Amino acid sequence: MRITDVLQTIKDNEDLNETPMESDEKMVLFPGMPCLNFSAAMSKENAQEKAHLFEGWAFTKTNYLIFGFGLVLIGGGYLVMYSGTVNSFRSLSLAPVMLFLGYVVFIPAALIYRDKKKSH
């Protein structure tokens, strides 16, 4: 199906449906793929009131400490890699392990960790 056929189908559906769709109705452009009514989904009636950024912020001091330690490992890994010679233990083994731990272990752990006493 070409894009012009899709646009024609949308135009035909708009011409057939003179009344606006209810919020729980679905429009089907392709068989098996329903599209929700976008204007109803984005209406101000469905918007949450008082949605503030830091109300649901789950990061604690522990999260920031783990994240900071991950950043220190990453920065230290690059410094160790820079300071070692090309075929040295520091450049080939120590620095990659430090970078791996920083990027793959500590940064994700800081994002995932939750205090047991503060979880809802």
Image: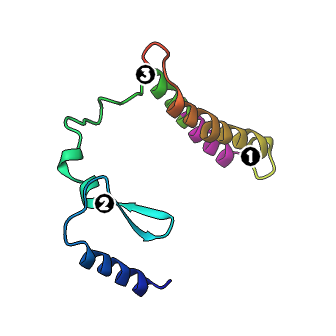
Closer to the camera in the image, 91 or 41: 41
Q: Which mark is residue 37?
A: 2
Closer to the camera in the image, 94 or 120: 120
Residue range in magenta is: 72-84
Labels 1 & 3 near each other (Cβ < 8 A): no
On the image, numbered disc 1 is attached to which residue?
91
Task: Work out whether mark 1 precedes mark 3 in sequence or the reverse, and give the earlier one.
Answer: 3
Amino acid type assigned to the residue bearing label 1 in the image: Ser
Q: Nearer the viewer, mark 1 or mark 2?
A: 2
The picture places residue 107, in percent across and down from the top left corner, at: 55, 36
Task: Work out whether mark 3 precedes mark 2 in sequence or the reverse, and give the earlier one.
Answer: 2
Closer to the camera in the image, 47 or 13: 13
Residue depicted at x 45% and y 28%: 64
The picture places residue 57, in percent across and down from the top left corner, at: 36, 30
Residue depicted at x 43% and y 62%: 34
Amino acid type assigned to the residue bearing label 2 in the image: Asn
From mark 3 to mark 2, how far is it between C-alphas? 42 Å
Asked whether, in this view, residue 52 is left or right of residue 89, the answer is left
Instruction: Answer above or below: position of 27 versus 76.
Output: below
Q: Which mark is residue 61?
A: 3
Asked whether, in this view, residue 98 is left or right of residue 115, the answer is right
User: Which quadrant of the structure image shows residue 88?
Assistant: top right
- Regarding mark 1 in the picture, which secondary structure is present there? helix
